[in-house]
């Protein structure tokens, strides 16, 4: 838009408007500088060079006074009409500029009131709190992260908070939170008054576990509570085909090893992923994801799982058994598509993730070189790998046993015994007579005794005779029956199996096509 910069005044002279718009004769006017702080229409500027002068027009018609008067009068009369038009243009420009300013102010106000602005301010406040050091006479927010070999007491005192004030609030928190459970990485934040009193103290071990102590001036004590934080639960499904190892395959899909571990725990009684997982095996799972304030927090429960491999088509579905007693926690378990319990007397492996380096049977001994019976299974594992009890039982021996090195023996019901050899150490409390539960970490693998490399030697005996741990068929838990089974099949198996099949069809279409082709061929052979 072209804005006017001059008009004829009542004396026939030029009145120039300083609008912050430079004027270049013969070219379009362009707004290049900022708006003036005051009302730009009330300011006067210097006329631009080269602009026309009405006095010059009057000199051109000099020689005849009447003609000059008529010329000036006529000129101003015509300009009066132009000025009206030009003034209308100025008013329109001012109105548009004013509206633009109003829009900008409204946009700024909307942002200032938005969640995004509040989040930015909170980030700013937290950054300041992380570097703050209390000074006498100044109220401030101070935040910190627990460092290795530091207690929360030391961490707070190091930030200038008076020792007595720190002791007071921590002692009050002890009623709800045991600070002996503190770990490096825990977060804390204190609102400290001008006198150095901790008005509010917040301690966070995870986004879901936060304790807060608030000072009550009337009671002159602290009120402590654990915040109730309820994450949003979302359900998602994934599927894939094993390449290399199950664990690495899950990670290659962009998921965490935590999810792979949870899937393996579902089938820990029926599949040994160290020995029975093969390239080309197909898996699928439906699981929960927990979100807090729209951000991923952690994985939840595996609701349904499927694994098609060497041991056939294995399926598992979560079943929650609620007790009639509201004070008792619900029991969780996994059952197959028929309601049969997946839990067995023995776990398939005493290690979570490893590889079998030597199986049960005759072999050439790696140290003596002679051919002899190998009465167990060797799992290659770095020193310090957690070793689990494959079944509940009683410790009958925990100590040094010659070539076995550090050996652990556990007696189980039904005449079974398991042995764990070449250990680096036993867990606390593991000694003869101690009771252990299935899945409990009882020791750590090592390289003690007659061993050529770090590994776990695992044996199983039945009525005193060695048997192959990888082939033992142990008794299973109780299956679902009656109405409970029917409800499980209808509410769990049916909808979840559909989601599992959809995930396989989506992610592993070649597998589905191969099955359909095989089924079609089978039908032709039958005909």
Image: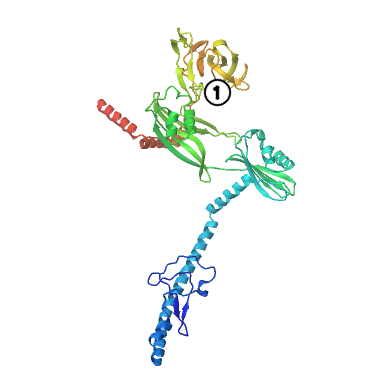
Tell me where residue 213 appears, x and y as whole percent: 67, 43
Residue 427, percent from left and from top:
60, 22
Nearest the camera: 144 or 203?
A: 144
State which quarter of the image contains the C terminus: top left
Q: Quadrant of the N terminus?
A: bottom left
Q: Position of residue 194 (x, y in %)?
A: 72, 50
Q: Quadrant of residue 433?
A: top right
- Image position of 231 (left or right of 281): right
Q: Which residue is mark 1?
A: 384
Seen as rendered, the residue at the extreme top is: 370
Q: Residue at x 75, y 46 (%)?
A: 220
- Give the vertical position of 405 relative to 202 (above or below): above
Is 50 on the left-hand or right-hand side of 172?
A: left
Q: Nearer the viewer, residue 148 or 67?
A: 67
Res 481 seen here = no
Q: Is residue 431 above or below residue 22?
A: above
The residue drawn where x is 61% and y is 48% is: 128
């Amino acid at each position: 838009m072209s804005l006017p910069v001059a008009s004829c005044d009542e004396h026939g002279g030029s009145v120039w408007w300083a609008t912050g718009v430079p004027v270049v004769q013969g070219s379009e006017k362009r707004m290049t500088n900022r708006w003036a702080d005051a009302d730009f229409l009330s300011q006067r500027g210097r006329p631009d060079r080269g602009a026309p002068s009405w006095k010059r027009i009057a000199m051109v018609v000099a020689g005849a006074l009447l003609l000059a008067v008529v010329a000036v009068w006529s000129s101003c009369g015509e300009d009066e009409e132009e000025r009206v038009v030009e003034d209308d243009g100025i008013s329109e420009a001012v109105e548009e500029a004013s509206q633009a300013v109003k829009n900008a102010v409204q946009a700024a106000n909307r942002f200032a009131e938005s969640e995004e602005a509040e989040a930015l301010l909170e980030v700013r406040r937290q950054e300041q709190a992380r570097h703050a050091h209390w000074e006498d006479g100044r109220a401030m927010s101070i935040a910190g992260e627990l460092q290795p070999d530091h207690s929360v007491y030391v961490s707070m005192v190091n930030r200038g908070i008076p020792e007595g004030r720190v002791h007071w609030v921590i002692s009050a928190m002890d009623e709800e939170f045991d600070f002996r459970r503190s770990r490096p990485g825990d977060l804390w934040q204190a609102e400290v008054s001008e006198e150095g009193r901790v008005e509010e103290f917040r301690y966070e071990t995870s986004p879901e576990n936060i304790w807060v102590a608030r000072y009550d001036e009337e009671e002159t004590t602290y009120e402590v509570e654990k915040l109730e934080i309820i994450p949003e639960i979302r359900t998602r499904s994934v599927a894939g085909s094993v390449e290399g190892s199950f664990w690495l395959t899950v990670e290659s899909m962009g998921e965490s090893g935590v999810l792979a571990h949870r899937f393996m725990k579902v089938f820990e009684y029926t599949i040994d992923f160290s020995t029975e997982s093969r390239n080309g095996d197909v898996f699928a799972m439906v699981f929960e994801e927990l979100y807090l304030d729209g951000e991923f927090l952690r994985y939840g429960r595996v609701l349904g799982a499927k694994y098609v491999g060497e041991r056939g088509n294995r399926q598992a579905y979560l079943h929650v058994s609620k007790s009639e007693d509201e004070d008792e926690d619900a029991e969780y378990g996994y059952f197959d598509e028929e309601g049969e319990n997946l839990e067995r007397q023995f776990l398939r492996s005493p290690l979570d993730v490893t590889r079998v380096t030597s199986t049960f049977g005759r072999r050439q001994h790696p140290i003596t070189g002679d051919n002899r019976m190998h009465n167990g299974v060797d799992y290659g594992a770095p020193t310090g790998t957690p070793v689990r009890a494959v079944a509940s039982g009683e410790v009958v021996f925990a100590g040094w046993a010659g070539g076995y090195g550090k050996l652990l023996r556990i007696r189980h019901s039904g005449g079974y015994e398991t042995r764990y050899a070449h250990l680096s150490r036993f867990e606390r409390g593991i000694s003869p007579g101690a009771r252990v539960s299935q899945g409990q970490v009882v020791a750590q693998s090592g390289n003690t005794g007659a061993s050529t490399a770090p590994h776990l030697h695992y044996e199983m005996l039945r009525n005193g005779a060695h048997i192959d741990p990888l082939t033992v068929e142990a008794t299973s838990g109780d299956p679902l029956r009656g109405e409970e089974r029917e409800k499980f099949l209808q509410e769990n198996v049916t909808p979840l199996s559909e989601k599992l099949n959809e995930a396989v069809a989506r992610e592993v279409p070649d597998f589905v096509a191969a099955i359909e082709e095989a089924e079609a061929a089978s039908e032709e052979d039958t005909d």
